Each structure stands twice: as structure tokens, then as C-alpha cells.
Image (spheres, rainbow, N blue to C red):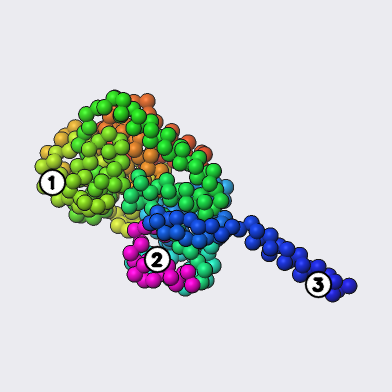
Amino acid sequence: MKFFNKVAAAAAGFCLFISSIALADTVKVTDVTGREVEVNVPVEHVILGEGRQIYFVGALDKDEPFKRVVGWRDDLAKADPETYAAYLAKYPDIAKLPTFGGMKDGTFDIEQAVALKPDVMLMNIDAKTATEEAGYIEKLEKVGIPLVYVDFREKPMENTEPSMRLIGKLFGKEEKAEEFIKFRADSIAKVTDTLAKANPKKPLVFMERAGGYSDDCCMSFGNENFGRMVEFAGGVNMAKDIIPGTFGTVNPEQVIASNPDQIIITGGNWEGYVPGGAWVGVGYGADEKEAQRKLEGLTERPAFTGVKAVKDGNVHAVWHQFYNNPYQFVAIQQMAKWLHPDLFGDLDPEATFKELHERFLTLPYKSGYFVSLNASR
């Protein structure tokens, strides 16, 4: 009788094994670099090559945003400590998740990654060169771990939708991904359709990247990321023809000579990187009065001497992390209100962001992502 029980147990185990294989399909997906990669989907164990990928991963698995995550890069706690703290309070076990250093700084531990046996590894496109030079793709392939590239930073207005569709496919959450994509597209259209109809004069905008993060001035954006978002919002990006790529710098004399109509500075709580810095601490649940005080302090730098935007009070700050996640449409709406207040008086970016949280995220919405020196805006 014991023998037959063992046989029955073995048969049942074999059936479970077969059924698990049947549930997983091997498919070819194309990542944002055009690479075709074979992956067994839906994936159940994922390594996030950047912790901030949780901004979208969490939207696909709203009730359990970390259920597939077996390891992640250690950047979220420093780059966005308020969001990390909110997740940690709700999901304390994330403190135990294995963390990694970055590919670009050479601190990624491939042996640790292999030991976690992920079904896939999501890697940001900006780490592509370092990843390839280190031979990580081949090393991971040898142990059956596919790596796919996504991009919410280098060319977000081009690669955000393909990245969301890719992750949706990997997770078996295509419908949810398409729901998010439509919400994003409709939210952007509220701005672009109005601008196309009204055809207003476009103000010159200086977009400063991470103002106050260091004593240097001034980091900015070329014709992508926030630079492109300015164009979507009905402005002219001052650095468009100065910076050839996505990121770069302009000197203070160029800012003064260009005399922008509007200045928008990206900020965040970077206490983990630059303790006590002059950066503007906007973000999840931020102290808006303190952020406004620090924003005003940044206008006293030599680069802004006599500039029209400062004289008119048209200096604003926006959450820096919009540059690295699929929520850019919220920033586009807010910038449109700053640049064209008469056209977008009824547009409510806060309500848009709140709806995003209610529909797609497990965290409750908290304001604090925008401040302005112009009280009317």
C-alpha cells in the first residue's frame, strides 16, 4: 500500500510539473533596443535593474506590487526616499529584498543575480554600454536568465509606451498596460489638442536639471526628456539647440543672454546624496513651503541675474523623478498651466495624478510635486 501511495504522489507531482510548463509560454519579445529575446511568460521572478522601475511595475501588480520582485537596484531609497518609505510602511518585507549596485558604476553583482534565479532581468537602456562591455548578457544567457532593456529616461517620449507594453507582456498584464497607456495618451492630448487649436505664442523656457544639487550651474536637457516635455506643454526649450543629446550643461552666460520667459527647475529630496543641499525638495508629501523657500534661494545665483523669468516670478519647480517614469504626462499638464495659464485654467494636474494613484497604484496620493514663485499659478 505504501508503494502505491508513493507512486500516486510521484504521479501527482509530475502532473503539477507538466501543468506549470503548460502555463508558461516561451515567447520572443523585442526590447527597446530592437533585440529579440526569448522569455517564458508570464514571469514570476524579476530583478529590477533600477529600483525606480517599481513606478510602473507597481501599476501592473497594484495589490501586490513586489510579488514578482526577487531583487532590485538600491537607488529608490536615496533618489525618492518618501516613496520608498511609504512602500516600506505598507510592505515591510521589502527591506529584506536583495539589492544591487549599478552596471555603470561597476558594482553590480552578477553571482548574486544568478543565485536569485530570476525569470527575467529588466535593465535601463542607459546601462547598455556598461552591460555589454562587461559581457553580462552572455553570462546571464548561459544560465538561462534573459535580460531586456526598457527606457523611461533617455528618450521617454519615444520609448515609454514600448517599455510599458514589453513589461505588460512579460507579466501577462497586457490589458492593464494598455489601460495605463490610454490614460497617459488621453492626459497628454488634453494639452496638445488645446495647443493645436489655440496656437498660442510659445514662451522661451529654461529647464534646469537638479538645480542646487551641486554648486555648478547649469545642467539642462536637450531635445528629449524634460526638454521634449516643455515642447509638448507649449514652450520652446532654451537648450534644444545647445545640448546635442538628452542631457548636458549650459553656462550661466547662455542663460542670461537667452533671457528665458519661464524657468522650471527639477528637484527632489536628495538628502541621501547631498545632505543639506540647496536642492528643492519636491516629491511625495513634500513640505511645499520649505520647497518654495529653497526655490527662491536658487534665483539668487549669478546665472539668473536680471532674467525676465525671475523678474516676473515665473520660476517653478517640478519633481525630478518625472524624468524617469511613465508619469511624465502629469508634469506636461502642470508645465502647460505654468506656460499658458489662460488656456489651461480648468486643467487639474493634481486631480490627474490622484486618479493615477487611485486606478493603478497601491499608495494613496499625497501632494507636493510642484511649487511656483508665481502665486497665481
Q: Quadrant of the N terminus?
A: bottom right
Quadrant position of residue 68: bottom right
> For the stretch drawn in magenta, what is the main secondary structure?
helix
Residue at the spot of label 3: 6
Could you tell me which residue is drawn at 48 percent across and 56 percent down? 29
| Residue at the extreme bottom | 3
Could you tell me which residue is drawn at 54 percent across and 53 percent down? 171
Earlier sequence position, callout 2 versus callout 1: 2
Earlier sequence position, callout 3 versus callout 2: 3
**Hey, what amino acid is under mark 2?**
Gly
**Residue 244: percent from left, percent from top:** 21, 51
Could you tell me which residue is drawn at 22 percent across and 29 percent down? 201
Residue 124 highlighted magenta (yes or no):
yes
Q: Secondary structure at mark 2?
A: loop
Left or right of 164? Residue 271 is left
Residue at the spot of label 1: 254
Q: Secondary structure at mark 1?
A: helix
What range of the chain is rendered magenta? 123-142
Q: Callout 2 environment at 10 Å: few (<14), some (14 to 19), or many (20+)?
A: some
